[in-house]
Amino acid sequence: MPFKLDIVGETGLQFYGKMSASMSHEIKNVLSVIQEHAGLLEDFAVMAKQGGAIEPQRVTTLATKIQGQIERANGIVKGMNQLAHSVDEPVKSLDLGQTLTLLVALSQRFASVRGVRLEPTLPSNAVTVTSSPFILQNLAWLCLDFAMQVAGNGKVVRLSVQPAGQGAQLKFSQLEGLGDKPAETFPGEQEKALLQALNAEVEMRIGEIVVTLPGDPTR
């Protein structure tokens, strides 16, 4: 009998694979830029050996650019590390502001390719729920992925978090093209499975998608 994952597990693997491929691609880009800068440093070294004059400012500028790429790579690896550790505990207390920050970091490359600008608004006070870190990130990504498809001519997706009763809401707004999509387009089978796993709900409003999360999915 062929091995068959349930839909939540299969969707999770697709999500993890997509994000890992994207982040490794970004790291490869960083290494390519650093390699290019290293080539320039070698050229400077050859010039110096041949008695040529090298302006200190050019070396300083190059060093600053390399440091910038290193910081960029550190940011990417930090995101990979956070995503990897999201499977450490099936359920835990989560700060949704941090969840939103990670989602935006993971999604920037996808947004850039589509020409969409992500505008996160972090809450002034921590908004927490007890939930599955990995499944919630997976659901949030699928919502954002769809939101970017319906961003419309404005090409902006605003993301925010707010308390809602005993739980919280994750909002994707400024979706100018949302009304042009058939109602049955979203949520699909994958989103519905993740919503059920989290005991969460999704609501399609004018120009926005709202995910409502319980404070504790076991209650």
Image (cartoon, grey):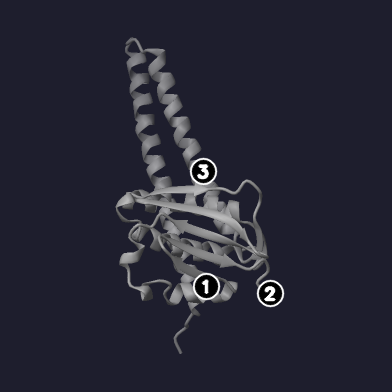
In the rendered structure, find residue 194 and report the number of the disc placed on it: 1
Location of residue 35 with respect to 10 vertically, above or below? above
Q: Looking at the picture, does residue 60 appear above or below residue 165?
A: above
Element carrying mark 1: helix
Looking at marks 1 and 2 on the same chain, the residue that comes earlier in the sequence is marked by 1
Q: Amino acid at mark 1?
A: Leu
10 and 129: which is toward the camera? 129
User: For residue 218, which numbered disc appears in the image?
Assistant: 2
Q: Work out whether residue 208 or residue 38 is closer to the camera in this orientation and state it.
A: 208
In the displayed structure, does residue 101 sit left or right of residue 64? Answer: right
Question: How far apart are the two marked residues, 3 and 2, measured between alpha carbons?
Answer: 34 Å
Which one is in front, 47 or 18?
A: 18
Q: Residues within 10 Å of mark 3 (few under 14, many from 20)?
A: some
Residue in the image at 45% along x and 47% along y: 119
Which of 93/178 is in front? Answer: 178
Viewer-nearest of labels 3 and 2? 2
Mark 1 to mark 3: distance in Å?
A: 28 Å
Which mark sits nearer the N-terminus, 1 or 3?
3
